[in-house]
Image (cartoon, rainbow, N blue to C red):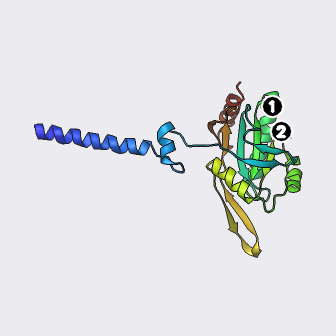
Amino acid sequence: MKLFRIAVWTAIALLCGILIGFSGYLPGTNSKEALGTGTARFGGPFQLTAHSGEAIDNATLAGKPYLVFFGFTHCPDICPTTLFELTDLMAEMGPLADRFTPLFITVDPERDTQEVLAQYMTAFDQRIVALRGNQAETDAVVKAFAAYYRKVPIEGGRYTMDHTAGIILMDAKGNFAGTLDIHEPRDTVLAKLRRLAGA
């Protein structure tokens, strides 16, 4: 009986060790970073240019919550749909939407010049800021937000872009505050945005 109890407690200890080991690791993060916080790392140094020509970096955004959405202007559905949804949500929120800054960051700087972005953004809420950078700057901001993109060749020598589609929420201190999916119930999305705005 004593040997049986020892075997049981040994098995429990091993199981706990395995579970603790898994809890310290999150896919897409450095395991040492995850062990300290239990959350994925989002945010970090970056420098880009707005569709208005203004230089924007992580320091510029300090003190005000912001949203990060990666995409590109040649996107056939997800990107324009998301931006139109954001436009509609911000209209419903009214002045409360002034409390955060939505960022649309292109992962296709080859085609998305400042001029192209400026024209593209005329279709959406003027408070949404489109950002672009050179290839190195684009890679840096994608890495900073643990995002993903990939150039995908299509017929005719053209290409499209595969990319992270969710919206990342950052608080006024530059800390990760959650994610937003436009396919969630509208009340849920509005509640997240109002919470981010401090309402």
Toward the viewer: 137 or 165? 137
Indicate the position of residue 156 as horizontal and vertical percent values. 77, 75
Residue wearing tag 2: 127
> Circle 1 — which element?
helix
Name the residue: 73% across, 31% down. Answer: 63
Is disc 2 in contact with disc 1, using a CB cutoff of under 8 Å? yes
Indicate the position of residue 172 as horizontal and vertical percent values. 70, 31
The amino acid beneath tag 2 is Arg
The crowding category of the residue bearing disc 2, from other C-alpha atoms within 10 Å (few below 14, some 14 to 19, many at least 20), is some
* Earlier sequence position, callout 2 versus callout 1: 1
Q: In this view, does 8 lie above or below 164?
A: above
Looking at the rendering, which quadrant does residue 95 occupy?
A: top right
Toward the viewer: 98 or 89? 98
Toward the viewer: 28 or 162? 28
User: Can residue 84 be spotted in the picture?
Assistant: no
Name the residue: 24% across, 43% down. Answer: 11
Q: Rounded to the nearest whole Å, what is the CA distance between mark 2 and mark 1?
A: 8 Å
> Which quadrant would the C terminus be assigned to in this image?
top right
Q: In this view, does 25 lie above or below 194?
A: below
> Which quadrant would the N terminus be assigned to in this image?
top left
The amino acid beneath tag 1 is Asp
In-image side of 113 versus 61 (left or right): right
> Circle 2 — which element?
loop
The crowding category of the residue bearing disc 1, from other C-alpha atoms within 10 Å (few below 14, some 14 to 19, many at least 20), is few
Residue wearing tag 1: 98
Q: In this view, does 84 lie above or below 115?
A: above
Which residue is outermost to the top? 199
Q: Is residue 99 above or below residue 46?
A: above
Looking at the rendering, which quadrant does residue 134 occupy?
A: bottom right
